[in-house]
Amino acid sequence: MPHVRKNGLPAYKQIQDAIVKRLEHGLLRPGDLVDSERELARIHGVSLMTARHALTGLEREGMVVRRRGAGTFVAPPKIHFNKLMSYTEQMSGRGLAVSSRVLSLGAIHTEQEIAARLALPTTCPLIKLERLRLSGDEPCAVETCYFSAGEFASLTRARLDRVSLFSILEHDYGLQIAHADEEVDATIADAQTARLLRIPHGAAVLRIRQIIYSTTGKPGLYVLGLYRSDRHSLFIRRFR
């Protein structure tokens, strides 16, 4: 039987709630040291096993990280891909500052496979937009977007460093985004990606390839994203 307090909550859950409230009020920030199992047991008047259970649960949820010999620390915030939103919307929804650095922007004629994925003639020129996505000063992702050059030519003059791309497409072009077909896998960072994301060459990154469709069923853009695996996770709910 789990140790239960007067309000009906298991003691380990009360410990977790107390830590989460400190996070929400800014009393604990990413990288801060969390009270040890022994200290939590003393503060809350529970067994060492109960305190350990509380920290294990928070670690499983990605809220803390435990380092052998050093202690338990607040984990960097992770972005969960469980809804079709722009990266700006995802980050802002979690109260995180977001910005972008445009790495390249221009017309190309060499991506025949991507043109085909967009249901365009393989000879059709595309606009390629490559951006480094940042939270504060920390790089989190490299995203490359492809569009029809004929339909979105003026995008090359848009402010794409701080404005949501979805917002521009919806308000300036009338593109109503409906859904996306996605391919998700893991890959390793090449030298350029590693340098941009400030991770070791060959480190694992989450790769998401998207064909994003409008409400008319027409492909609107193709996105290739390379995301730091220590900052992003894919949330999937399955039903039987």
Image (tube, helix red, strand yellow):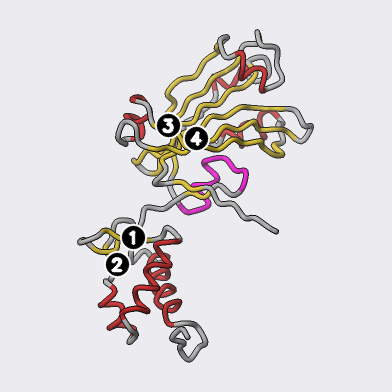
Separation (CA) of disc 4 from disc 3: 14 Å
Residue located at (52% from left, 37% from top) = 185
Q: Give the number of the mark in front: 2 or 4.
A: 4
- Which of the two discs, 4 and 1, sits closer to the camera? 4
Q: Are marks 1 and 3 in contact (CB under 8 Å)?
A: no
* Residue 86 on the magenta span: yes
Q: Secondary structure at mark 4?
A: strand
Q: Quadrant of residue 214?
A: top right
Residue 143: x and y in percent read 49, 31
The residue under label 3 is which amino acid type?
A: Leu
Quadrant of the image occupied by residue 57:
bottom left
Label placed on residue 34: 2
CB under 8 Å between discs 1 and 2 = yes
Q: Which residues are magenta?
A: 83-95
Q: Looking at numbered disc 4 in the image, what kind of residue is underneath it?
A: Arg
Q: Residue at x 62, y 22 (%)?
A: 147
Tag 2–tag 4 contact (CB < 8 Å): no
Q: Which residue position holds label 1?
A: 74
Q: Which mark is residue 207?
A: 4
Spatial CA span between label 3 and label 2: 32 Å
- Left or right of 211: which side holds 231? left
Which of the two discs, 3 and 2, labels the residue nearer the N terminus?
Answer: 2
Name which of mark 4 and mark 1 comes first in the sequence.
Answer: 1
Of 108 and 208, the residue lying toward us: 208
Name the foreground residue: 226 vs 96.
Answer: 226
Report the mark closest to the observer, 1 or 3: 1
Query: Where does the image place residue 20, in percent across and percent down from the top left?
Result: 42, 68
Does the CB distance between marks 4 and 3 fall below 8 Å? no
Tell me the CA gap for discs 1 and 3: 25 Å
Q: CA distance from mark 4 to mark 1?
A: 25 Å
Please state which amino acid type lies under the numbered disc 1.
Val
